[in-house]
Structure formats: C-alpha cells, structure tokens
Image: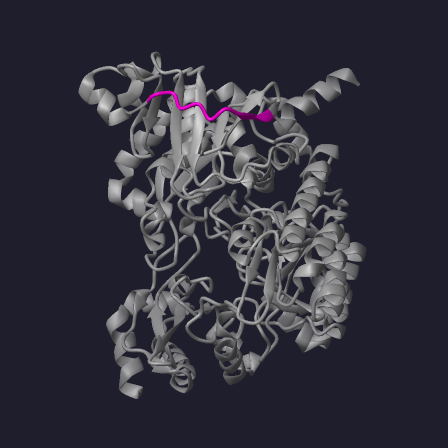
C-alpha cells in the first residue's frame, strides 16, 4: 500500500486546516450558506434532505485496518454508528454536525485519509479494480497509476473548475471490474505487440441522463507519457466543454458532438504543445511509487483444495460461501474473499462500526492488513491463505458478514435515494430491500446465477441502473414514486447500456416485475447462460412481452 | 474595482490603474491594439487568433464570468507555457479569495477583487506549503522536491 511521506501528510493536514478555517467563517456568520456552499463542495460536504453528508475518499478503494478502524471510530463519535460505502469506492457519513466536521477530518488525516475532491467539478477519486495486485492476468498493479493520478490531480490549479465532475478509472486486467468504459476517462493497461506496457485511453463514457460507452481516443500510450496526455484531454475539455447546461456539461457530450476523430485530433494537437518533461513523472518517481505496490511477501504455498473440500463437505453454508464469494488468487495457496454488504433485506453498502472493526481485525490477522472497497458496494479481503479461509469465514459469520450472495440477484447496487438524497425523485433502498427479501432463499439465488440489479433514485444514475442486467430507475409522477425498468446493461468488459423496457411501474409492481423477468429467463435459458446472455440471445422484445403480459 | 498585484511574492493593493483596454474582437477589426496596452480576451476565443497582438499587449485580461467557469485557468496556462507571454495577466469577474492560489499557479499576476482584504488574500496564497504538479508559476512540484531531498541525503 502507498504510505504518505512528509509531503503527502503536510498537504492533507494543510487542507484540513484550510477547511477548518472555512467552517469557522461559516459558523461565525462571515460566510453565508450561499458563499460557503462552493467551498464545502470542494471538500465532499453536501447538504442533503435531513442533514449534512460528508463523503470521504478511499483512493482506488484500498484501506488498511488502521484506516478502517478510524472510519468506524468516526462513525461512533460523529455519526450514528454506521457508514455507507458508495459505487465510487468512497464512504459517506450521513449525519455529521457541521461543527464536528473539522475534527472528524483531523482524525482521518492521522490515518492518511481526507475528503479532498470527493465533490465539485474537479477530478474525483480515481477508482480501480478491487482485485488489483491479487488476481491473475494483470499487466501490473493498476493502483500504481491511480496513485500517480491522485497526486497529479490533487489541487490541480487548472482543473478545479471544470464544466462538470470528472471521473477516471484504471484497470490492468482483461476482466474489467472497474467499469472503465463508463467513466469520463477509462485507462486500460495492456501490452502492445512489441511487448511494451501502455494504456488504451478511453474517453467520454458515462451514465447519468445521457449514457454513453467510452470510445478509444488512443489505442496505446506509453506508460510514462500518461500525465501530459491526461492534461491535454482535460484542457480541451475545460476550454470547450459546454457550460450552459449542467446536463450537457460532461465530457461525453463534447466527445459525441465533435466525434471521436475530431476530439482526438484536438487532444493530440494540445498534447504536442505540452512541456512533457515538466508534466510527466520521471522514472525515479514512478519507481518510488511503484515500490509501494510490490506484492506482499506471499509464502511459497501449495493450493489447499482438498482440505477446503473436506471443510465444505462438513459445512454446506461454508461450501456456498466458498463457491460464491471466493475468487482465485494469482499466488498458489492464496485466495480472494468478497465480503457482501448486502445481507438479505439489508441496505446495500451500509456497514456498522462494529462490522467495520470486525473486518479490520480479520484483515490485520489474515490478509496482510489490506481491505478493498468495490464499486458494487462490497468489501474484499484480497490476500488470504486458503488454509485460513474457513477460520475467516467463521469470523465473518460471527460478525454477520458472511452472506454468500456475491454477484447474485440480492447483490444489488442502490444509491441512497429519497431516504437521504436531495436530488432523488424516488426511494431506492426499500426497493432493494424488498427484491432481496423476495429472493431470500440462497438456493434459488444460486440457481438463477449471476444477475446484476442496479437501482437509481433519479436520472443522475448513481445506482448505475443503465449498466444493470436489470436496471431500475425511480421517477416522480405527480408526487408518486414510479420505477422504470431497463434491461441488458453491463458495466463489464462487454459494456452495454440497458434499454428501457416500457412504461413505469409502481413500487409494488416493480418487485413483481423483477420476479417475472427472472422466471421468464429461467424458462428460456439454454445451458449455463446468464440472464444477460439469454437477454442478448432472445432480444428485448421477448422480455418486454413477458414483463407486460404479466402486468 | 480594487486591484491586487504582486510585489515580490506578496500581494499588495495597487492603484486601480485603468490602462486603456481593447477587446480582441476590436483589435482584430482594427488590425492593431491602437493606443491600448491591455488586451481583453474572452473565454471562447482561440488564443491562436490573438497571436499577433500578444507581443504588443502589456496586460492580458481574462474573465471569470462566474467562479465556477474555469476556462480562464487554461487560457492563462496556454499564454504562459505555449505563447511565452511575459506581461501581466489579470483576473476579472467573479474572483474570490479561495481561488487566488489556483489563479497564481496558472500564471495570473493581477486580480480585480471586490472587498479586497490584502491580509486574507496573502493568507489564502500561503495555505499550502507545496504542490504536487507543475503548473505555470515555476514552483517545483513535489516529485522534484522528493528528488532534491534524496540527493541531499
């Protein structure tokens, strides 16, 4: 993991101090709420329906045990004993008092955490693959480049007042677990035919009101050229992106208005003029950062399958958890475990302070002190010994964190919705809870197989409904909550935007509708087809027909 | 409108001189700056179109129609880094204390700022000891400081 040196630590401490001053100016009345708003929105502090909400950055979703404990402690001390993990690998506090926020941020600064650029029209927290450094098949650990981008983008003087927010994701694996095709910039590390490592640079992906899949602006960019190239993209966007309408201000609108060839030509022209030596990191600094992401000291182990098989035979619940939540590790004898934050009937992504402490203890003892947050609002223990899996499972079970539903119908992404959010048109959380309860039986969930349901409470699409196999969008119709279903979306390497299935449904009908769709899939699937595969094979009409015939 | 200018590394109140200004469009129509010494470049102008007038201008004025409109940051960087503009770059419009550091780093040297409190403005410029990235103020980015520190060790 990256560790702060004196420079990183100083900047975070100075930012906390600066924000303390801004809060003091607000509390003393020197600043009106209107004047304070742009300042707090540079530091992740929103005013929601019922209270302030503070979003804390978890750079590329990586946490140490000490950081997880500090987040838990802050939840106890300044909030209501729980937090919400978001689709951007961040964490949110729902109920902090304004007067406490500076102290909360000071506490987090001590464990190298902050709220810098978690809101505002700037470059947001860079996200990545939750299995980075652990899964087989990576070119290298993508977090090296996330950290390089984090430093470059922090307080970037030119790009702090962009037309709109800006999200960058990095993957280094053929399996895209970071949804890079639906980001403003997606970076895919890969090897070219000459065996050199570089980035495919995608631009203009995004969800929201106008969803787009990102397009390739450069098929291969040598690694060490990254920052100047990013600067060129951001400058073209900053100068030419629309500012007359917030809904048309993301880079995707500019890219699609110009066309990818013209956009690429403008970026290349700007790139040619940038002082590369001043902007790109030199090799020694890249090496310094890379060293922090060297793999932990894996012991030379053998795979442990037979013993695990025996444990699984004696404990069918463990067998299911192992089947669903455990993912192969690149090192022999190790495994990756997903911790579901989607208990049946629970609130997706929420975790209590006690649960967070339990995860921290387990990670410290068994997982090289590392925890990951996923964009699907779960946690991951990236480096476990297979020999410890059963013990870890039991510890998770004791903490209520062993739900074996990873990737299944109850592993739902949901935004906070109208229960919290001032932008929402409808509630998301209760819909997620009721779908989860409807499909409570894990045997049946396993029979259904991989099915990604994603729920947004408004068109801003924080719940990623466009890329759900089944997406659910909450809308307000004359004061009543309605839900529109989209089908066939995917945020993975086979990215696609879901299609609207038809007229909106009431909150009661939408849960039935999901069941109808699942039933139709089960009746028509062939072999091992996933829901999305059957949908793609049969096409939208058959599914729509099934959906509305029943309604 | 009160004007703050650098005197060395500190901002100081300057006499609100009003050098005769000309808008880029008018300069283009006239083919020169005429008597004017300050050139007003709008946010949507391509700097390439202003190229011929840059040498004659002592001051370039860039606008912030709203603090959220950050185009002038990029324009200032292009003027400094790509056009080698050495004169004054003045920020006009919705200029607030909390943006001054970003503006300076992008190459601005003068600020038209309402209710200018010189102490507060200088405080805002000094809230951070260093910056991660190179910009147009010549400050050594953190990676360069790390390297110097290693060399000294």
Residue that lies at the very extreme toward the left in this rendered image: B29
Q: Position of residue B85 (x, y in %)?
A: 42, 16
Q: Which residues are magenta?
A: B11-20
Residue pictured at 62% horizontal, 56% vertical: A29
Q: Position of residue A531 (x, y in %)?
A: 40, 70
Coloured how? one colour
Is A393 displayed left or right of A184 in the figure? right
Of A323 and B148, which appears nearest the observer? B148
Is B58 displayed left or right of A48 in the figure? left
Q: Does the magenta run of residues contain B15?
A: yes
Please identify the dominant SS of the magenta region: loop
Q: Position of residue A77 (x, y in %)?
A: 76, 65
Of A84 and A35, which appears nearest the observer? A35
Q: Position of residue B42 (x, y in %)?
A: 32, 32
Residue pictured at 42% horizontal, 86% vertical: A508
Of A390 and A508, which appears nearest the observer? A508
Residue that lies at the very extreme toward the top in this rendered image: B55
Residue A481 vertical position relative to residue A319 in the rendered view, above or below: below
Residue pictured at 44% horizontal, 16% vertical: B87
Quadrant where the image shows the C terminus of chain A: bottom left
Residue pictured at 59% horizontal, 48% vertical: A60
Q: Does the magenta run of residues contain B16?
A: yes
Residue A322 appears anywhere in the view = yes
């Amino acid at each position: 993991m990256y560790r702060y040196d004196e420079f990183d630590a100083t900047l975070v401490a100075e930012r906390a101090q600066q924000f303390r001053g801004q809060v003091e100016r607000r509390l003393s009345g020197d600043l009106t709420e209107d004047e304070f708003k742009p300042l707090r929105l540079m530091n992740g502090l929103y005013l929601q329906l019922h209270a302030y909400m503070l979003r804390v950055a978890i750079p590329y979703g990586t946490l140490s045990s000490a950081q997880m404990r500090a987040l838990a402690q802050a939840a106890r001390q300044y909030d209501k004993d729980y937090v919400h993990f978001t689709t951007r690998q961040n964490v949110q506090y729902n109920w902090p008092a304004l007067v406490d926020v500076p102290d909360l941020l000071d506490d987090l600064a001590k464990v190298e955490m902050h709220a810098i650029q978690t809101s505002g029209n700037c470059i947001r927290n860079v996200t990545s693959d939750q299995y980075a450094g652990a899964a087989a098949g990576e070119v290298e650990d993508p977090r090296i480049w996330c950290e390089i981008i984090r430093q470059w983008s922090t307080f970037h003087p030119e790009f702090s007042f962009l037309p709109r927010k800006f999200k960058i994701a990095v993957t280094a694996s053929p399996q895209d677990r970071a949804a890079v095709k639906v980001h403003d910039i997606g970076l895919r590390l890969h090897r070219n035919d000459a065996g050199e490592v570089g980035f495919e640079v995608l631009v203009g992906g995004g969800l929201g009101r106008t969803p787009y899949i990102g397009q390739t602006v450069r098929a291969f960019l040598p690694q060490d050229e990254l920052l100047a190239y990013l600067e060129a993209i951001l400058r073209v966007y900053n100068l030419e992106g629309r500012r007359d309408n917030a809904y048309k201000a993301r880079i995707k609108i500019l890219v699609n208005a110009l066309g990818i060839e013209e956009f690429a030509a403008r970026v290349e022209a700007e790139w040619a003029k940038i002082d590369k030596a001043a902007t790109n990191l030199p090799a020694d600094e890249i090496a310094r950062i890379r060293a922090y992401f060297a793999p932990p000291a894996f012991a030379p182990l053998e795979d442990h399958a037979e013993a695990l098989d025996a444990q699984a035979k004696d404990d069918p619940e463990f067998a299911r958890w192992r089947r669903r939540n455990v993912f192969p590790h690149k090192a022999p004898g190790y495994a990756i475990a997903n911790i579901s934050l989607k208990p049946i009937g629970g609130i997706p992504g929420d975790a209590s302070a006690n649960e967070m402490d339990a995860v921290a203890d387990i990670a410290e003892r068994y997982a090289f002190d590392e925890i990951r947050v996923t964009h699907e609002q779960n946690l991951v223990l990236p480096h476990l010994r297979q020999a410890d899996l059963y013990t870890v499972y039991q510890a998770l079970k004791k903490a209520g964190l062993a739900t074996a539903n990873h990737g299944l119908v109850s592993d739902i992404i949901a935004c906070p919705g109208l229960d919290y959010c001032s932008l929402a048109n409808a509630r998301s959380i209760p819909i997620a809870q009721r779908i989860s309860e409807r499909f409570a039986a894990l045997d049946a969930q396993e029979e259904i197989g991989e099915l990604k349901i994603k729920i947004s409470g408004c068109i801003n699409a924080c719940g990623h409904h466009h890329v759900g196999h089944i997406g659910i969008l909450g809308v307000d119709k004359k004061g009543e909550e309605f839900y529109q279903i989209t089908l066939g979306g995917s945020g993975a390497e086979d990215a696609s935007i879901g299609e609207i299935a038809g007229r909106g449904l009431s909150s009661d009908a939408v849960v039935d509708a999901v069941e109808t769709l699942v039933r139709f899939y089960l009746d028509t699937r062939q072999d091992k087809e996933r829901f999305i595969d059957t949908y793609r094979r049969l096409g939208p009409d058959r599914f729509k027909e099934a959906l509305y015939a029943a309604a | 409108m009160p004007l703050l200018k650098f005197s060395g590394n500190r901002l100081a109140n300057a006499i609100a001189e009003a050098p005769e200004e000309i808008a880029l469009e008018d300069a283009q129509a006239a083919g020169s700056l005429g008597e004017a010494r300050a050139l007003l470049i709008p946010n949507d102008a391509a700097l390439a179109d202003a190229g011929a007038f840059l040498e004659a201008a002592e001051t370039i004025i860039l606008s912030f129609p709203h603090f959220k409109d950050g185009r002038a940051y990029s324009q200032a960087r292009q003027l400094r880094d790509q056009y080698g503009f050495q004169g004054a770059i003045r920020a006009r419009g919705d200029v607030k204390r909390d943006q001054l550091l970003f503006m300076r780093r992008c190459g601005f040297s003068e600020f038209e700022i309402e209710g200018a409190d010189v102490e507060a403005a200088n405080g805002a410029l000094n809230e951070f000891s260093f910056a991660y990235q190179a910009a147009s103020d010549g400050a050594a980015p953190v990676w360069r400081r790390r390297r110097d520190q290693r060399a000294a060790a």
